[in-house]
Image (tube, rainbow, N blue to C red):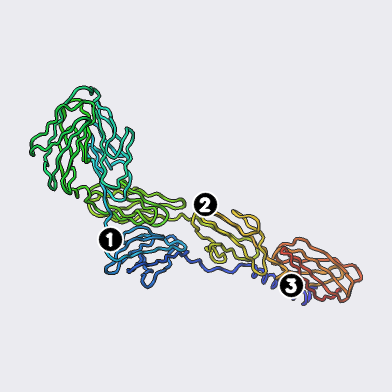
Amino acid sequence: MKTHHDRHDRRLAVLVALAALTLSLPAASPAASEPQGSISVTLTGSGRVQSSPGGIDCGSTCKASFPLGSAVRLSAVPASGFYLTAWSGGCVGGSQSCEATADEDTQVQAQFAAGSAPTPPVHALTVSYSGEGRVTSADPGVIDCGTNCWTSFSGGGHVTLNAAPASGFVFNGWEGACSGTGSCDVAVTGLRSVIAVFRRQNTHPGSNSQLTINNSSLGTGHGQGTIHISWPGGSKDCDEAEGDPCEVNNVPNGMKVTIQPRPGPDTVVNDYGGYCQGTAQLCVVVLGQDEGVTTTFQDAEGLTTSYGLNLTRSGGGSVKSVPPGIDCGGDAGCRAAFKRTITVKLTPNVASGYTFGGWSGDCSGTGSCTVSMTVSRTVSAAFRGQRDQVRVTKSGRGMGTITTEPGGIQCGDTCTYSFRRGSSVTLRATPNGRSRFRAWGGACTGTSPCSLTISAAVDVSAAFDRCAASEFSRFTASATRKAVTVRVSLADRATARVRLLRGRATLATRTFSNLSAGAKSLRVPIRRGAAGKAKVELRLKDICGRTRTLSRSVSVK
């Protein structure tokens, strides 16, 4: 017959089990907010910087938070009498606006200086050829002489030229700023002239020919010039009246003859015609028969009149131009000037761990940028740091927190975070007071702090055990003349030892190994003759290595 005491014990056991279950459930975490990055601006000189979207207005507010990895456009506003010299840090370049990426701590400097922005000095490369053939640049579109025989740009970049003779001609070699018969590499740090000399295949040294010069700009004033002809053993100044040809007789065949213009003040060669073609400041021919050359002159400004190209970029890559001029990898090389009407091609070079986000300003999209220099141009290039997600999953009945260094994961609440590719991340596990950290899983192993170098998305698991002895606070016990029964609810795995004691004597004992979590009924048989009052002792040793012992009195009937 069930007594009131038995029903009370069963109700108590149910309440204990429910309390343990409630304690074993992790508390609901609030929804994680969107990860945030930040941009800080430092000013030098007089001016201000504002952001779009809003947040930064520096002067006053020079740091703001934005969604992690988002693009933020910064605009520089110089004070009266000042100009923006350059951006540096997370933005590089010299145009008025720059697109920065809100990473964990992006730093941008804006430098203002008094006065007006200087114009970069522009230098010209002029090319001519004699005979029949073609001169082209290794980078398409810079020089193609026949039709395009000069270019100009700032920055002192290099241009590589190649010569190809026409049928019936051979390449005799380079003159001017290049020599030899291979490719010609010329640094355009000033006015440079390169001449490709093609001669006829059937040229016969030992005979003579006539060279006729027609100069349509004869004179010594501005926009005018004279011509000097020379070869080994002979020379002539062509100073005939304008419109009259200058005939140079008995010029040796097979020998280099230099046609040297002598321009007036602030004057340069405009072009050649006839047996010479192009715009170089001299021409060299090898005669095999009678030939004629025409020359004209122009104002020197015609070679250096240009439009500016201002480039800005975010960190994570560089930009180069063809023709050279823009080489924006460091803090310099991001502003250049180019020959008017020329087409400039900009190409992004992406650093490891980044992607190219695209162009803005006078270019758009993510391919190469091509602009025609019919006006001054402004272009921005955006690079984005690649990010890979680290996701932490917790398991087990225990409770604890996973954190990362650098910050990002606080799990707890935030169990996923996208770290910059290539970065080093250390994960640490901290159990609460009633749990222990069992082990890592996934991309981590063992129990020590886990260090990862991020190269792709990563999954990590962290197992925590509940320390049952730490939560063990009550149990129920009942006894009959045959057995004592203990009812207890375990928060996690444990080993239990039940003893029935009377004084110092042990009437019954039993150990229950490796019990799982949950409500348990532990029965220990009793020998005959044990009736009377006794004490039931329950000792728990949990998987955390902790022990706890409780007891209560019973009557053995």
**Mark 2 or mark 1: whose residue is earlier in sequence:** 1
Secondary structure of residue under mark 2: loop
Q: Is residue 153 left or right of residue 497?
A: left
Q: Would residue 299 be found to the left or right of residue 426 on screen?
A: left
- Helix, strand or loop at label 3? It is helix
Mark 2 or 1: the one toward you: 1
Q: Earlier in the sequence, mark 2 or mark 3?
A: 3
Q: Farthest residue toward the front? A: 233
User: 153 or 448: which is nearer to us?
Assistant: 153
Residue 19 location in percent, x, y? Answer: 67, 72
Measuring from the top left, give residue 438's x and y in whole percent.
67, 60
Direction from residue 262 to residue 328 in the image, left or right: right
Mark 2 = which residue?
455
Specify the amino acid type for callout 1.
Answer: Ala
Q: Look at the numbered discs 2 and 3 and tell me whether their residues touch, using CB distance below 8 Å.
A: no
Query: Could you say whether the residue bearing mark 1 is in a helix, strand or loop?
Result: loop
Work out whether residue 407 or residue 301 is closer to the camera in this orientation and state it.
Answer: 301
| Quadrant in the rendering for residue 186 | top left
Name the front one of labels 1 and 3.
1
Classify 10 Å Cα crowding around label 1: few (below 14), some (14-19), many (20 and above). few
Earlier residue among tags 1 and 3? 3
How far apart are the alpha carbons under marks 2 and 1? 43 Å
Q: Does residue 457 appear to the left or right of 553 in the view shown? A: left
Where residue 218 appears, as percent x and y from the top left, is 11, 41
Q: CA distance from mark 1 to mark 3?
A: 89 Å
Query: Of the numbered discs in the image, which one, if any, rests on residue 305?
Result: none
Residue plotted at (78% across, 61% down) = 513
Residue 117, numbered circle: 1
Viewer-nearest of discs 2 and 3: 2
> Disc 3 marks which amino acid?
Arg
Task: State the residue position of label 3.
Answer: 10
Residue type at mark 2? Ser
